[in-house]
Amino acid sequence: MKKRYLILVVVGIFLTMGAGIFRPVPKPPENELLITEGKIEQIFEGGIKDIVFQLEGTEQQYYINRGVDQGLDIKAMRDELVGKEVIIKYPDYWTILDPNKKIRHISKIEVEGDIIFSEM
């Protein structure tokens, strides 16, 4: 009997963790997004065809999910954007894969008033 309860508890823990890992990134309206500004230090591919932006003076990274699959060109973005001031808008959410919120999902990125990317 104890063995059955132990198995149920373990399965429950795994299901709860799975729900926390695989839940989608929320897509709130633009007026509910968090905003950060900074100068782009580097742009590189990370994850699975994600485009990752590193801003100067911060450890936090921002990414466009599957940006390469969406037709965005990393080399062209590097040539155009590195060293420029950007405005990045992103949702406020927590995931077990990034408990310290060091990697943020980009909903919208602007440079000099131009929208570079938007999923809105």
Image (tube, helix red, strand yellow):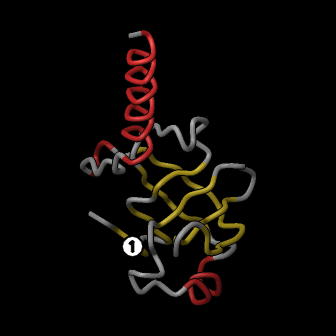
Name the residue type under label 1.
Ile
Q: Residue at x 39, y 15 (%)?
A: 5
Residue 11's x, y, as percent?
40, 30
Query: Residue 23: x percent and y percent?
Result: 35, 45
Q: Residue furthest right?
A: 57
47 in relation to 114, above or below:
above
Is disc 1 surrounded by few (<14), some (14 to 19) or many (20+) residues within 10 Å?
Answer: few
Residue 82, relative to residue 28: is it above or below? below
Of the pair 19 and 2, the residue shown nearer to us: 2
What is the quadrant of the N terminus in the image? top left
Q: Is residue 37 above or below residue 109?
A: above
| Mark 1, secondary structure of its residue | strand
Q: Nearer the viewer, residue 20 or 4?
A: 4
Residue 116, picture quadrant:
bottom left
Q: Is residue 82 above or below residue 4?
A: below
Quarter assignment of residue 100: top right
Quarter of the image containing the C terminus?
bottom left
Name the residue: 38% across, 35% down: 15
Among all residues in the image, which is located at the extreme front?
Answer: 1
Q: Is residue 73 left or right of residue 25?
A: right
Residue 24 placed where, x, y %? 34, 50
User: Could you tell me residue 49's position as x and y percent?
Assistant: 52, 75
Q: Residue at x 47, y 40 (%)?
A: 95
Residue furthest to the top in view is: 2
Q: Which residue is mark 1?
A: 115
Q: How many marks?
A: 1
